[in-house]
Amino acid sequence: MLEIRDLSVSYGGIKAVRDISFDVNDGEICTLIGSNGAGKSTTLKSIIGLVKTEAGSVKIDGKEIIGKQTNEIVTEGITLVPEGRNVFPDMSVLENLKIGAYMRTDSLTEDIAYVYDLFPRLKERSWQPAGTLSGGEQQMLAVGRALMSKPKIIMMDEPSLGLAPIIVQGIFDIIKEINKQGVTVLLIEQNANMALKVAHSAYVMETGAITLSGTGEELARNEKIKAAYLGAKVKQA
């Protein structure tokens, strides 16, 4: 569904993403793991058109989207849940959800009901200003807002960042449920253990390059990955 080929992004003289290529298949959860500064967030921002690419190709269903504006890319079926959530604090929960559908001209009733079914707490707080929600509730709202564009692919940048462990588990349950409903997921997550547990495919990024790939299970069993990202000690030969 999503094909990235030889993608490069530079900030000034620094190459943040270096000729990376990977695929996200229809109906799967794909995760990018790596340390801070590896280029993961820049990759998502370049796909959605928030960061200008230096070279390479990004295609959805075979259609090139490099060079398109972000609003045009959203209409092609890709949306982003940004790191830090970025809800509109003075607007209500419902108003935030409607903003997620700003490119649509059809009825929003069913989709708002769908988001409220996924996140009952948002329904309870429908008219509450988004800035008064807890961190976990704001993350729910950010995900719900992204779903309002009816995406084929939802990209999530650090959805568990700063959340309590019990809330993190709930967020990952929702990611699996969204995927079960037919939405493809591209996930960036510092909690590599949780990410690899839910991922069908996974890639490791280091200093702007993809250095390893496999299924979520394969990478979770990899001794080097365990040592670098999962807090395990490498077994001595």
Image (cartoon, helix red, strand yellow):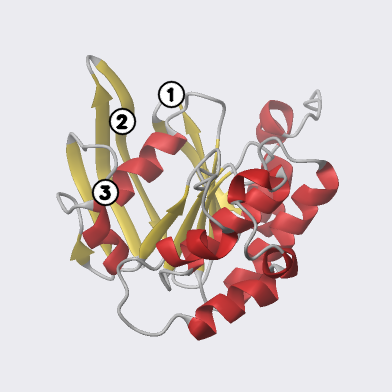
- Which mark is first along the chain, 1 or 3? 3
Q: Position of residue 143 (x, y in %)?
A: 56, 58
Q: Give me the disc on residue 48.
A: none
Question: In the current view of this chain or complex, which residue is farthest to the top?
Answer: 13
Q: Amino acid at mark 3?
A: Arg
Label 1 near label 2: C-beta < 8 Å? yes
Q: Is residue 229 left or right of residue 206?
A: right
Q: Residue at x 74, y 34 (%)?
A: 230
Binning the other alpha carbons within 10 Å of mark 1 as few (below 14), some (14 to 19) or many (20 upward) gives some
Q: Residue at x 60, y 42 (%)?
A: 189
Which amino acid is tagged 1?
A: Thr
Residue 147, placed above or below residue 225: below
Quadrant position of residue 142 = bottom right
Which residue is labeled 1 in the image? Answer: 207
Whole-percent x, y for residue 171 in the image: 70, 56
Q: Please state which of residues 119 and 221 is positioned toward the viewer in this rendering.
A: 119
